[in-house]
Image (cartoon, rainbow, N blue to C red):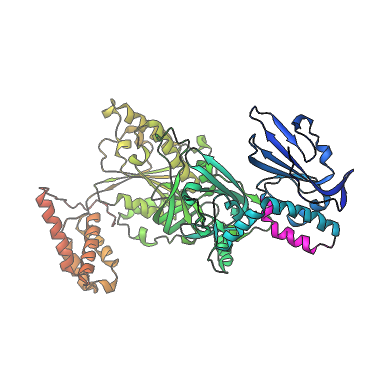
Amino acid sequence: MHSEEVPIRRNGSTSHGDHPITCQAKTYRQIKKKDGSTLMKTELDDLESMNNYNMDEDSSYALVIKRYLADDDKPESVSLRINSSLLLTAFKEVVKSYPTVAADFTTPFELKSPFQVLLHYWEQLDTYRKETESPQMRQHLNLLFQFMKLEMGSEKDTCDSMLRKQMIMYKQAWVVYPPGELLYTEVLGQPWLLRVEKVAYERSASDGPFMVVYAKYCDADENKVGETNTSFRILQRVYFASDHPVKIQTLPVYPLRFSDQKEDLKEKLILRGKKAIGNQGIVAKDYDGLADYLKEPPDAFWHPEMAEFDAVWLPFTETGRLVLDRKTYEEENSNFATTIHEVEDPELFLMPPFLMGYSMDRKDWCRYLVDNIKDIAWKGDAWSSLILQPEQKSVLEALVMSHEYPSNARNHPEQKGKGLVVLLHGSPGSGKTMSAEAAAEMAHKPLLTTSMSDLSQTGSPWMFERNLQDLLQFATTWKAIVLFDEADVLLQSREKDSMNTTRMALVAVFLKHLEYFSGIVFLTTNRTEAIDEAMFSRLHLSINFGPPNSETRRRIWALNFMKVPANDTKIREQADRDEAIKELVRYKLNGREISNAMNTARTLARFEGAQLDMPHIKRVLEVGQTFEKHVGEAVTREPSPDRNYLCV
């Protein structure tokens, strides 16, 4: 039987409450028996049951130390109770608060190994000890430091040696992350600063041991700017695969003091933060650059040894339109919702480098880098370039521009019949889709494009309805225009296909939601001979698109020539263009074919290092005709002067 005692003698005292405090440490050894019972002894007492332990007897000691051992005397953990009012004062003035210590340092408190607060504040407490003018304060701090050197001295020396080389091991990695420290990480190559809150060691069945770094950062919504928090998992098997120190900079998040960033980083991040704040609410934007989307695990994924499988962010290149809308994103993805606590003086350099937005191209929520977000440059010539009969064009313009989006759009019953539904029908390549796009550009509205394959990937009416509801709700919230491209399946009469119960269910669902949608919808189809009777009552305008006649083809060719920069073509003079167009209109092509032919001819000219000329265009057209003859297709499109056409 033996005892362990911090070698400090009674050479000073103070008081806390009604108890005088001696500058002495009392040490216990607590042993856990194999049968589950617990025994304890001090340097004076024999082993006795824990039931006889009285904490009040220890209140006169500045420090109370308990060492927890297994039945074989193998150390398991250590706890330290600080009773000294002088030490409480020192902690209150130096540490102030610490996330993993449930104390405000006004009353005695307890710490457990590995004593993170003591190691993180070692230098500050040592400086306070050396500078204090109170002999009693210095004595009590000397007592504390004797314990710290005995219990943690060798580990601190090891950590200091590694940190001087900017390296660390998994077991000591927590040392790198003192609370309040500025953290550095990157998202798609862009810097993001955060502040440490705390760290914890955990393990899971799928990932094994890992350390979690909890951090806070600055964030904003349309109502406030404040603080919120996040966490980073540092997996031992990924970042500390061997039992050797690793470079701190190789960790996914690490203190800014170990980074190579320039001193003006904060100023740049403040400007980025201000830009992010200016893009809160619902905002349609242009984007060009890297973004990332969340790849969810397969629904059918399961493995008996893996209790969880996290989604991952995957990068892609985005060039196009998006809608920024944090509120709707968090409503759709509640697991990623954050609570922002408003603060008086937010640290804008802690704003994240990304904003959540909906990609019009991917039809999914993505993370967009703030630096790559731009104001939309609406195509002012899109509507003026629309080749359509004047009366149809003026009616369509009036309907789109005068449409009012209700302020109570979420009140579903009140929206019945308040939408605008336009049917665009005609042959392929005749400009139906581009008409809807031109209308959206003219109205400065986002365009949500969808199709049957987007809404019903599984063929389930339930899934189709859910996707349709989401789409129409987005359009309502964002005051966007919806384009149902190639909507033949939804428009065909149900009477001629009454045995197909799935399609009948899809059409019924579509008609129901269309009737209660208060926005603008464009429907395109190549077939009009069998449109469902119920659809006719929901249409406000129907425009037919057919093969272009010679005059329409002339205008389409002219518009395509105008898009070619003068330095890229030999056909610059108006007389030369007129002569070229006169020859080209003899080819009975639709607008898409004319546009494709012109783009292909320009590519051919660039490949040859030459300017675009008639031989390039003719060569492309002749190759196309050869292909049509080879597959045995006689493409004869008779011109019709009463048909409409839009150049694409």
Q: Nearer the viewer, residue 493 or 595?
A: 595
Examine the rendered structure and indicate whether residue 517 appears above or below residue 214. above
Q: Name the spot of residue 555 as percent of width and height, x first.
A: 25, 61
Examine the rendered structure and indicate whether residue 613 appears above or below residue 635. below
Left or right of 82 in this view: 632: left
Q: Nearer the viewer, residue 645 or 227?
A: 227
In this rendering, does residue 406 appear at all? no
* Dominant secondary structure, magenta: helix
Q: Name the spot of residue 100 as percent of width and height, x first.
A: 67, 46
Single out the residue that lies furthest toward the front.
Answer: 1
Q: Name the spot of residue 433 as percent of width and height, x first.
A: 32, 50
Tell me the quarter of the image containing the N terminus: top right
Q: Name the spot of residue 349 as percent of width and height, x first.
A: 59, 61
Q: Nearer the viewer, residue 118 or 597?
A: 118
Give the image quarter of residue 320: bottom left
Residues shaded magenta: 116-134
In this rendering, does residue 327 appear at all? yes
Q: Nearer the viewer, residue 414 or 251?
A: 251
Single out the residue that lies furthest toward the top.
Answer: 499
**Which residue is at 15% across, 68% downward?**
615
Left or right of 608 in this view: 197: right
**Which residue is at 68% across, 50% downward?**
151
Count of labels in the image: 0
Examine the rendered structure and indicate whether residue 408 appears above or below residue 124. above
Give the image quarter of residue 489: top left
Left or right of 364 in this view: 330: right
Magenta highlight on residue 133:
yes
Examine the rendered structure and indicate whether residue 631 appears above or below residue 56. below
Tell me the quarter of the image containing the C terminus: bottom left
**Which residue is at 47% across, 44% downward?**
474
Magenta highlight on residue 327:
no
